[in-house]
Amino acid sequence: MKTYTIRRADGDVPLSETVAGTPWVKADTVYIDEFSWHDEGPKPATQGHVLYDDRALFLQFFAEDDEIHAETTELNGPTYADSSVEFFAAPGGDRYFNFEANCCGQFKLAWQEPGWQDHGQRELISPELASRIDVRTSVPGSTKEPAPGDDGWWLAAAIPFSVLSELTGREIGPETGTEWRGNVYRSGVPDPRKATWNPIEEPEPAYHSPEYFGRLRFE
């Protein structure tokens, strides 16, 4: 089981691709490089950083992509089918949230129990709460068609802990020593190119698998 340390930001965190000279330089790199379903072909590189402060959780991703695409424009839509990245975390207990954002910045944020597909125990973020989440990307517009010259994209997001607290119905405010469980994924690509941070030992892609979450430790 892998462990990732989420560092505390020592200043304002820019939602951009810039790392040098910003608090992002302090963050450990999370490599999404476990290709559990790869049989042949390329393995596109995806990596990122995670930081936090008293207000929010900050995510930054860089994705190698030669077919950048996005069709989902509605909140909580099937962003996983677009060029996208996903951050899953269980902040104590069995329930977990998943933040799935596509290359144009549209996202889904849900709170669920393991096995929610069978019994429907899932809450999706409301438009009002979603409006308090800030997402920036390198891809302009609300949709994207693959084009010659596509080689990659970046995404950065700030998710306030107050939003997570309202969505989950529990107080979420990590501090030094707090430990979550979680995983980070690359999606919207053919199965052989799908990748995770902590490996998933299943015969087919199964991102909603909290039993394969790694450790997320707050500095």
Image: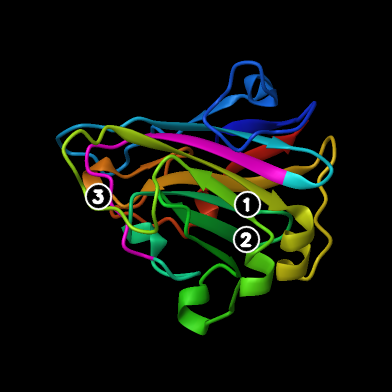
The residue identified by callout 2 is 96
Structural distance between the alpha carbons of marks 1 and 3: 29 Å
Three-letter code, disc 3:
Asp
* Residue sitting nearer the eye, 116 or 174: 174
- Circle 1 sits in a helix, a strand or a loop, which is it? strand
Q: Residue furthest front?
A: 141
Number of the label disc, if any, that sits on residue 12: none
Q: Where does the image place residue 29, in percent across and percent down from the top left? A: 55, 25
Q: Are dots 3 and 2 in contact, CB under 8 Å?
A: no
**What residue lies at 84% left-to-right and 43% top-to-bottom?**
54
> In the visual, does 213 lie left or right of 132?
left
Closer to the camera: disc 1 or disc 2?
A: 1
Residue 170, located in which quarter of the rendered image? bottom right
**What residue lies at 52% left-to-right and 74% top-to-bottom?**
116
- Circle 3 sits in a helix, a strand or a loop, which is it? helix
> Looking at the figure, which quarter contains the N terminus?
top right
Q: Where does the image place residue 66, in percent across and percent down from the top left? A: 23, 37
- Circle 2 sits in a helix, a strand or a loop, which is it? strand
Instruction: Residue 97: say if magenta.
Output: no
Structural distance between the alpha carbons of marks 1 and 2: 21 Å
| Vertical arrangement, residue 183 with respect to residue 126, above or below | above
Number of the label disc, if any, that sits on residue 191: 3
Label located before the other in sequence (1 or 2): 2
